[in-house]
Image (cartoon, grey):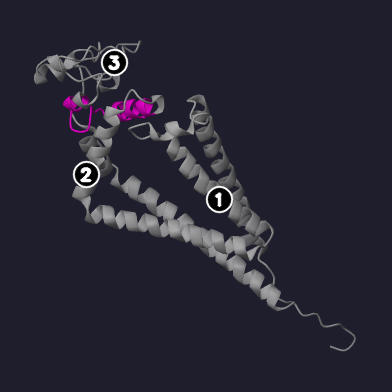
Amino acid sequence: MPGKAQHFQGPQVSCCAKYLLFASNVLFWMLGAAFLAIGLWAWAEKGVLSNLSSITDLGGFDPVWLFLVVGGVMFVLGFAGCIGALRENTFLLKFFSVFLGLIFFLELTAGVLAFIFKDWIKDQLNFFINNNVKAYRDDIDLQNLIDFAQEYWSCCGAHGPNDWNLNIYFNCTDSNPSRERCGVPFSCCVKDPAGDVLNTQCGYDVRLKLELEQQSFIHTKGCAGQFEKWLQDNLIVVAGTFVGVALLQIFGICLAQNLVSDINAVKANW
């Protein structure tokens, strides 16, 4: 049109995608940093940081590793997504997409393999529980984790109370001088609804009783079976959680890739 300047509107980076990815990853980054801080603090309290060789001394599973690994992954992902979106850095955004895609693929593979090799998974779960039963008194965090699991699922040991024979403090051998001999941890005990004070000695000598008598004092079902039952009873919730997490991961990958495409389109017009 005569007398009016013509302006060409070139490609632009989507502000919505940019700041949505930035905001979500700031939260992710902060959560990862918090998890790492908790893990390192727990190790410092146990003296692990001053003696790193003690990391390999624990015979069972140290729950602190869960905080450190999950926190580390969240921190790295959050950093790449946050800075990549804010600075429009395609390298960091591609790293974020690939890393998140790799995690999604590993989760999917683990789910398929767990479904195919159910019996093997059960055997590994039993081995894992019994291995940690042996190390019950070796680490306070592991002890708290086992006590929580046994109280939550109303169980005792992997298959039953006799699994506690694997622990040097609870086994029934004549050579065992421990006061906890032939007993179980307090977390195996059936709670008294009227009791206000926790009786930490309720499991003492309980395995000297007949099996029918034991049922009045402790839970006699194994944690492996109770965990499997819990999964079956809460299958919809568990499956829904995994699907929700998977959808969030796919959404994050698509958002990052969309932002990379926008940035490349803008650069192509320079």
Q: Quadrant of the C terminus?
A: bottom right
> How far across and how far down the image is residue 27, in percent?
59, 45
The residue that disc 2 covers is: 122
Which residue is identified by label 3?
A: 193
Q: CA distance from mark 2 to mark 1?
A: 33 Å
Which residue type carries mark 1?
Val
The answer for how far apart the CA atoms under marks 3 and 2 are is: 33 Å
Could you say where residue 38 lies in the image, as x and y percent from the top left?
A: 52, 33
Where, quadrant-wise, is the N terminus in this rendering? bottom right
Tell me the quarter of the picture where residue 164 sits: top left
The span picked out in magenta is: 142-164
Q: Residues within 10 Å of mark 1 (few under 14, many from 20)?
A: some
Q: Residues within 10 Å of mark 2 (few under 14, many from 20)?
A: some
Picture disc at residue 76: 1
Q: Give the structural element (helix, strand or loop) at label 3.
A: loop
Disc 1/disc 3 C-alpha distance (Å): 46 Å
Kind of residue indicated by mark 3: Pro
Residue 250's x, y, as percent?
47, 60
Q: Locate residue 62 relative to residue 94 in the image: left or right.
A: left
Q: Is residue 39 above or below residue 25?
A: above
Q: Specify few, some or many for label 3: CA neighbours under 10 Å numbering under 14, 14-19, or 20 or more.
A: few
Look at the numbered discs 1 and 3 and tell me whether their residues touch, using CB distance below 8 Å.
no
In front of the other: 213 or 183? 183
Q: Nearer the viewer, residue 63 or 226?
A: 63
Depicted 14 relative to depicted 120: above or below: below
Q: Mark 2 falls on what kind of element?
A: helix
The total of numbered circles placed on residues is 3
Report the residue at 69% width, 59% height from top: 87
Q: Residue 62 appears at what percent x and percent y?
A: 39, 34
Secondary structure mostly taken by the magenta-highlighted segment of the chain: helix
